[in-house]
Each structure stands twice: as structure tokens, then as C-alpha cells.
Amino acid sequence: MKNIKKILRNTLITLACSALTAAVYAHPGPGKDRKGPPEHSLGSRGGIKHELRELNLTPQQREQIQTLMQQAREAHTPKRDAIAAERRKLREIINTDPVNPGAIRAQTMRIAELEAELNTLRAQERVKVEAVLTPEQRAKMKEIRARNEERMENEMRERIRKRWQESAN
């Protein structure tokens, strides 16, 4: 029973973090519409859009990349929608009585498979975008990505540290 409670708690924490992340990225922010970034901008939220802002792209590169990113958004939407639907199913399964650990695991695996497919799509799109860049821009992007990943790891460590402190109190 103790292990089931741990599994449920960890699953719920994972779902909450995933849902929060999805909500943050899905929300367009004040004054922005959801149909994509303005033509003069590649965005400022983070990820590849943020990295590209620092590369001094030519107008042609900017146009090519915006086209690729629009195609990626359209390709990713069905996967993101499917993941959201499967997460809703998981929440229903978690809230059933009696608890069914096998069903929870199976549903979690379905979500993991969909997320793996989406991550594969994202990686393929990144390769397409990087093909538009010059070798110097790709090198600079690699530096920017390393810097951003280090920053994100530090932020994650800090959030975890704060959670542990809060839970200890």
C-alpha cells in the first residue's frame, strides 16, 4: 500500500509539472494571438525561437525558418492534443476507486510513447531549421543552447531545493 501511494504521488507530481509546462507554453501571453509569432519576430519564450533571435538571421533565413516552424506547429498539434486527451484519461484512472496500479502504468506508458513520438518530431524539425543556418550560426547556436541548458538545470535544481525545504517544514 505504501508503494502504491508513492507511485500515485510521483505520478501526480509528474502530471502536474507536465500540465503546468503545457499551460505555460500554450498560453500566448497578453496581447498575442495564437496563430503564430508576428512576421518580424521569431518569438521570445525560449527554446529554438529564443536561440535564433541571437543569430542575426538574414531575411531569407528568417522566412525559411518561420515556414518550417509553422509546418512544425501544424504537425505537432495532433500529437499534443492526443497527449492531452491521454493525460485526462490518466487523471480519471488515478481517481477511480479502487486504485488500479496496472491501469495507471499502462496509461502512463501510452503517454510516454506519444511524448517520445512528439520529441522525435521536434528533433527532426530542429535539424531542418539548423540546415538553413550557416556553419558559424550553427556553432553559435550550439553555444547558446549549452548556456541555456546550464541555466535551466540550475533553475530546476533551485526549484527542487525549495520544494524539499517547503516539504521539510
Image (spheres, rainbow, N blue to C red):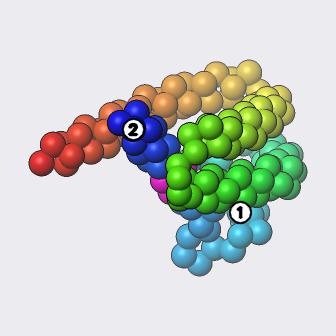
In the picture of the structure, the residue carrying the numbered disc 2 is 1
**Callout 1: helix, strand or loop?**
loop
Amino acid type at image mark 2: Met
Magenta stretch, residue numbers: 16-20
Res 144 → quadrant: top right
Query: Which image quarter is the N terminus in?
Result: top left
Q: Position of residue 66 (x, y in %)?
A: 80, 51
The residue positioned 53% from the left and 53% from the top of the image is: 98
Q: Nearer the viewer, mark 1 or mark 2?
A: 2
Looking at the image, residue 127 lies above or below residue 168: above
Q: Which mark is residue 37?
A: 1
Q: Which amino acid type is shown beneath numbered disc 1?
A: Pro
Residue 1, compared with residue 80, is above or below; it is: above
**Which of the two discs, 1 and 2, labels the residue nearer the N terminus?**
2
Disc tally is 2
Q: Is residue 73 visible?
A: no
The location of residue 75, given as percent across then percent down, is 86, 49
Give residue 110's position: percent from left, percent from top. 72, 40
Question: Could you tell me residue 108's position as x and y percent?
Answer: 63, 40
Q: Is residue 142 magenta?
A: no
